[in-house]
Image (cartoon, rainbow, N blue to C red):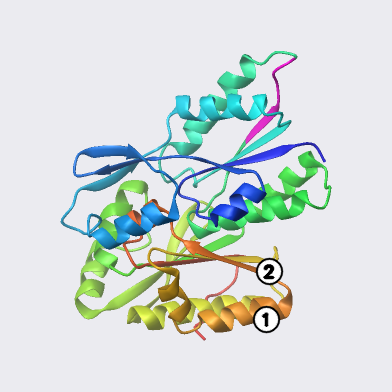
Amino acid sequence: MPQVAVVVDSVCALPPQFMRDFHIHHVPITININGSQFPDPCDDRVALEHFESGVLTRKNQVSTEAPSVETFQRLLWQLIDEGYQYIWIQTVNRMQGLTYDHANEAAASVTRRMTAQRKAVIRVMDSRTVFAGQALLAAETVRRMQTNEDPVAMRRELDKLSNNVHTYVVPRSPLVALERSKTRGERGVKWSQALVANTLGIHPILCVVNDGSHQADKIRGFEKAAQAVFGHVSTLVSEGRLLAPIVTANYSGKLEELRSLKGFAELKAACAREGVQFISNVASLSGGIYGSVGSLMVAAAAEPHEWQRV
């Protein structure tokens, strides 16, 4: 199969070794914390340091900016010079900022300036999802690469699949999640609902799918809400309803905390039993910013279905 590079923005979180092994490249977003700006280093250790430092709490002014057109261009030329024949850019869903637009602008500019000796096929995909959902789409991309599937046909199939990637988000701090995510087009929870949830310890379960989001459920207690998500996805796995044999989980905190949540071990066991790859990783810095520190994101690809509280 021709050399294919996958480019994701730093909202997407996958294990570092996995990314190196399968030629997945990050384009960093810009992080703004109390007026200080820096590019996301896309490093799990740095993300954990920020999660644990307290700088992402509600009292701090925290936001992000999409990767610039120039940042995309620099990486595209680098990958072309490294010999990649196909470059697929998979961005956070187009409703969540300017990343998709900037990627398209960069791809068009680089394509216009290609020469016979310096060229590649560049395509931009809206992942239609976020966080763990982006990780699932990238992981499924590299899985399909191992099958020698035609790149053009593969991209069409992945585009169809992206319509059905369901990303479940359980914010640890609903009020923080709402205040920050509403700037990125999040409409799954209303302000009044977040205030009530924050006061009563009720945690919304948000489902991001096909460039939109909605509240799938709301449950008192973060651990019970997380268990419900693990149980729902376990059911999809056990009933053979997945459209791709991969489940991804991100947690904006230590992985030991993720593994200790009720339902995690059962989901992992269900995936092993059914031959489904289960990938867990520390969430991106954006995951901690927009989902709130200590939040859970789990993704699976399946046809539209009713939420099931298990």
Question: 19 or 13: which is nearer to us?
Answer: 19
Q: Which mark is residue 242?
A: 2
Quarter of image, res 243? bottom right
Q: Residue at x 37, y 49 (%)?
A: 185
Residue 166: where, in percent of width, then height?
55, 63
Query: Amino acid under label 2?
Result: Leu
Q: In which quarter of the image is residue 242?
A: bottom right
Up-down relation of residue 235 to residue 119 (above or below): below
**Image quarter hosting the N terminus:** top right
Residue placed farthest to the left in the image? Answer: 59
10 Å neighbourhood of mark 1: few (<14), some, or many (≥20)?
A: some
Q: x and y percent of residue 50 in the render?
A: 30, 55
Q: What stretch is highlighted in magenta?
A: 117-123
Label 1, on which residue? Answer: 238
Residue type (three-letter) at the residue carrying disc 1? Ser
Dot 2: element: loop
Q: Residues within 10 Å of mark 2 (few under 14, many from 20)?
A: many
Mark pair 2, 1: CA separation: 9 Å
Q: Cβ–Cβ below 8 Å for labels 2 and 1?
A: no
| Left or right of residue 4, residue 226 in this image | left
Q: Where is residue 85 in the image (x, y as percent from the top left)?
A: 74, 30
**Secondary structure beneath label 1:** helix
The answer to whether residue 106 is magenta is no
Q: Is residue 91 above or below residue 80?
A: below
Q: Position of residue 76 (x, y in %)?
A: 59, 28
Question: What label does residue 184 carry, if any?
Answer: none
Disc count in the image? 2
Judging depth in this view, the residue of 53 and 34 nearest the camera is 53
